[in-house]
Amino acid sequence: MKKTIKALAVLLVLVALAGGGFYVFKNGLPGFRPPPTQPPVPVPAETPAPVDLQPPVLSGETEAPQGGGAAMAQLVNMERTVKAKRASDLSWEDAKQQMPLYENDAVRTFDKSSATIAFGPDELLDVDQNALVIIKPRPQGAGESEISLALLSSDFLDGLASKPAPEQARAIQAAASSRQVTIKAIPGTRRPGEKTRVAVHTLPDKSTSVAALSGSLKITNPKGGEIVLKEKMVMKLTDAGILTPRLLPGTPEPVFPDDGATYGFQRKAPKVELKWRPADRARSYRAIVATDSQFKRIFADEKVDGTSLPVRIQQPGTYYWRVRAQDADGFAGPYSSVRSVRTDYDDTPPVLAILSPPEMFVAPAPSVEIKGKTERDAKVKVNGQKAAVAADGSFSFPLALKEGVNLVTIEAIDSAGNSEYGKRLITYKGSKRATASVTGN
């Protein structure tokens, strides 16, 4: 009986715990202070899935046009103002060096600017000033090294300036269809290690010329005309097709100053006379001077009828120059080799040596020859009168004497404006006294 009572008591306790346990653990036992409330432990938020970021655009790169496709060319060099337009865009933007070019992209050069486009590892296209080039799809079966493009005058766009952009695009497309050419290098016609180099140039009549600067070319137009353009030859492309090729003007050869020649820069800016030998079939020349060897910072760009150009250097530094010939119809030949000229601060007077006559000279005749030597390109004055100076700096001057003591002043002035002086005292006793002196002896 006692065991039964104990079992019932245990069972009652278990039932009480099951019913009131929530009160015990939540509110504590009666008469006891409840335990302090603990702040809830924050549940970490779910980490968002990583987002695929677009790769950075490198310098000179631009986005590919819609529809994808591989780049057909690359703008590898440019001088001055060059614009580019994607086929899917309506506006022109500043071109970037090393930017890829896709099908129907356009490149435009402005006055005294130029661009070089690479169509493959060994094919370069030089785009001269005021030209519009549109990259066209290669004909079916054409190799990757072939160049296919439309050539227009940059002035063609000026006539469309007042029209809406869509209308401009349609006009450009229509004009490009009649000016499209395919250019293919003829194997074995260029020297080992040399690239095929093609040049396009806008002529005064707004037509476009294509020239083979290195290697021979086979050129085809949309009308089926095909022609072989040998190295150093040029042809004109018009709406009527391709005209008969002719020889390019020759390449001028720079002759003065020597490459790397240095001019002093002191009290006045030096004046440098750039000179070159005349080129075959040349009517005029285009001489360009820049402050960098890539001709991006142009200092002077002049059309010259002769074979020299005087340039006044404004600041000390190194200047680079080159020249090309143009014939009577505006066809331009290759540029000459590049030469450099350096100007430095110079406050050192030039060397001046008076070789004759000697000091305290007594002249037997009423005239005497002043001879000496100074620096190359220096000027010499004798008593204020200009003396002839040879290429090696030697000079001579015939000086008329008056009876008695003659003070002779010789001045040498270098290209920087520095001066050095010398003097001689020359005595002339007159013709009668000189004769008497000779007779008395």
Image: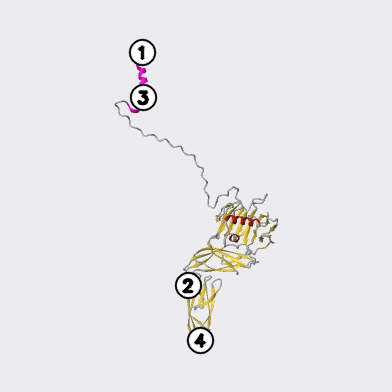
Identified by mark 4, the residue type is Gly
Identified by mark 1, the residue type is Thr
Identified by mark 3, the residue type is Gly
Q: Earlier in the sequence, mark 1 or mark 3?
A: 1
Identify the residue under disc 3: 21
Can you tell which of label 1 and label 2 is closer to the viewer? 1
Q: Earlier in the sequence, mark 4 or mark 3?
A: 3
Given residues 293 and 394, the one toward you in this image is: 293
Image height of 24 relative to 439, above or below? above
Q: Earlier in the sequence, mark 2 or mark 3?
A: 3
In percent of width and height, residue 427 lies at 49, 83
Identified by mark 2, the residue type is Ser
Does the magenta segment cover residue 328? no
Q: Residues within 10 Å of mark 4 (few under 14, many from 20)?
A: some
In percent of width and height, residue 55 lies at 52, 46
Secondary structure of the residue carrying numbered label 1 = helix
Can you tell which of label 2 and label 3 is closer to the viewer? 3
Can you tell which of label 4 and label 1 is closer to the viewer? 1
Q: On the rendered image, what quadrant is the N terminus found in? A: top left
Tell me if label 4 and label 1 are in contact, CB under 8 Å.
Answer: no
Q: Earlier in the sequence, mark 4 or mark 1?
A: 1
Q: Residues within 10 Å of mark 1 (few under 14, many from 20)?
A: few
Q: Earlier in the sequence, mark 2 or mark 4?
A: 2
Residue 4, numbered label: 1
Tell me if label 2 and label 4 are in contact, CB under 8 Å.
Answer: no
Given residues 189 and 71, the one toward you in this image is: 71
Identify the residue under disc 4: 430
Residue 419, numbered label: 2
